[in-house]
Image: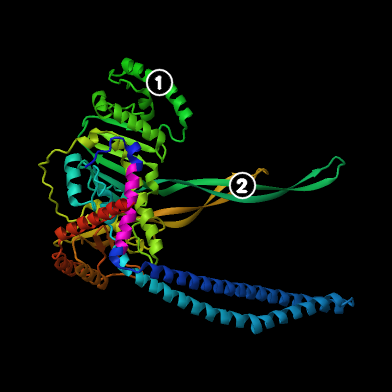
Amino acid sequence: MKEILEPLKEYSKYQERFDELVDATYEHLVKTSHIDVKQNQETVKKFNDADGLFRAERKKLNVQKNLKSFLIFLSVAAGIAIIIGALMLYGAIKVGTSVFAGVLTLSIGAVVMVAAILIITLVINKKIKLLKESAKQLKENADSILQEAWKQMEPLNSLFSSDITHDLVNSLDTIIHIDNYYSVLHEVYLNKYFKFPYFSEDDSTTTNMIVGTIAKNPFVIAREVEMEMGTKVYEGSLVVTWTETRRDSKGNVQTVTHSQTLVATVSRPCPYYNDETFLVYANEAAPNLNFSRSPQAKNKDDKQIERMVKRGERKLSKLVQDDMKHGDGSFVAMSDTEFDILFGAFDRDNETQFRLLFTPLAQRNTIDLIKDSPYDDDFYFIKKGKINTVLAHHADNWQMLAGRDFASYSVDISRELFANYNKDFFKHLYFMLAPLLNIPLYQQLLPNDMSFDLSSETNIAAREAELMANILPAEFLANADSATRAIYKIKYKPSIGAVDNIMIFASSFGITPRVEYVPRIAGNGRMYSVPVYWDEYFPLECTTEALLFDANGLNNEKYSELVRLLQENDVANGGKSAIAECSGIMIVLPKEGVANELANKINTILKTKDLKAQKEKRILFMAAIHELIKNQHLFD
């Protein structure tokens, strides 16, 4: 495994190598699937042409529908004109005045109404009918071609799996290794030795996770949704008018009308939901060191950073003096003051261990990252003993697991999806890990052999279970009256063999509209009640039973059998399924009263798993990719 000693300088090399792997892997998948690329491209072109004709016809149809709506409006207006003309005519006859205006209005209204009705019935309706039939035929033709394209792509789409991206990263043979998912081994190991909690906080739920190791030391990249109660300000207004009388300079009495908009606000409790992505890395290096840093040079150019460092040197000198006078005198500035200022870990509590981590190379790496990262200086770094936590703003835009659906009707679209997702994945992963990779000791210190019992009563880790719950459509889990997002928490029932039986608790809020009348004094001295409409949030709970298990290692035949079994017991409605899969972990909401029976049937299928064969298949797959790249280089 190769160490990455200068992460920022070495990034382009690894990204280029990774991009080659991505492109070669896709071509290998295409070759393995035996799809006819040229035929699919021709079919897609036919579909695009057919879809274009359908859209053009639908546009014509919409034009005629809009014209019909306008003529209907015109006929209604003409009818009103006829009534007005008749009233004008009646009035003119009654008082003996000219009837010309009434006759003209009535006549024009009648002509317009008759013309509009005739155009609608004799022309527009026929065109609409013909265009509807034509559009329907064109749509059916386009759908038929699209279905053919999907069928052509089926062999390739079936080869896409969630572990391809992990294998691509691992094939670079660096000290970074990605695991398939967050297993109970990760869960128990991190909890027992590093005190990393089994569950997220009560008001949080895990929506995404990537797990792996740096030099065999575990890291977890997680995205959580956190609910926090805050307040929301609601505003209402009321327009009031009043009249005043006064005399002008000539003594005449005048009436003046005043108008004023009265504004009132009320503050009421409101839940807020925040997505946060963070990295947790467990390493025994510098176990008694604690510190924190936040971005210091964000949105600053080189000259601004230079001025900031000069000002910071004075601040640093003052910190040392203050610590000598009022502290324990343990704070010692680093010899490289630029690093000290830009990293900004002034709350560090163990100078010896801080220097053990941040050697001259580590300092220089960190300065380079802060100054020249493609994401700017956007990372937070907190160390508490053996646990390192990194948060970075750029990670909030990382698709993580969400973009792994590469299936398409078009080989060209699929290729683009595959390339964009994987290349972006590596870039985000690399720079999420970069603050840690900057420290050589974190790549050199291997974990000690642990004597802890890593067994577990469950098959799937709690945070992984939360993740799986979040993949399911919300309508299956959250209260039907929910007006907000739901926070999912998990409680385990006794497992049934290799299947975990869990209860998913969904917490959300409903809304009751309220109004409050707030007194306000207007300019006339009177008190008015200004209505302020606000929302009262009330808590909602919903509990759902689910089955959760690891389906990795099943051959295609057994996996298909498993999917058929789950579909037969799916509580799906409205076209959405209550079955979800991610990295081989599956979750299903069973029909009422069949959970145990279904779990036993699932267990029967899971007994056929062959993890060894699966691993060998993945090794052969990546070996083929490397050979393909090697041959390409020889050819070039």
Residue at (46% x, 25% y) in the render: 307
Nearer to me, 156 or 449: 156
Most common SS among magenta residues: helix
Residue at (46% x, 30% y) in the render: 302
Amino acid type of disc 2?
Leu
Indicate whether 129 appears above or below 487. Answer: below
Residue 406: x and y, percent? 35, 61
CA separation, marks 1 and 2? 53 Å
Residue 308: x and y, percent? 45, 26
Name which quarter of the figure residue 131 lies in. Answer: bottom right
Q: Is residue 297 left or right of residue 63?
A: left
Q: Which residues are magenta?
A: 13-30
Q: Which residue is mark 1?
A: 313
Which image quadrant: the N terminus? Answer: top left
Name which quarter of the figure residue 246 lies in. Answer: top right
Name which quarter of the figure residue 41 lies in. Answer: bottom left
Nearer to me, 482 or 365: 365
Residue 260: x and y, percent? 66, 47
Which of the two discs, 1 and 2, labels the residue nearer the N terminus? 2
Looking at the rendered structure, the secondary structure element under dot 1 is helix
Indicate whether 460 appears above or below 476. Answer: above
Number of marks drawn: 2
Q: Badge 1: few (under 14), some or many (20 or more) residues near its Cα, within 10 Å?
A: some
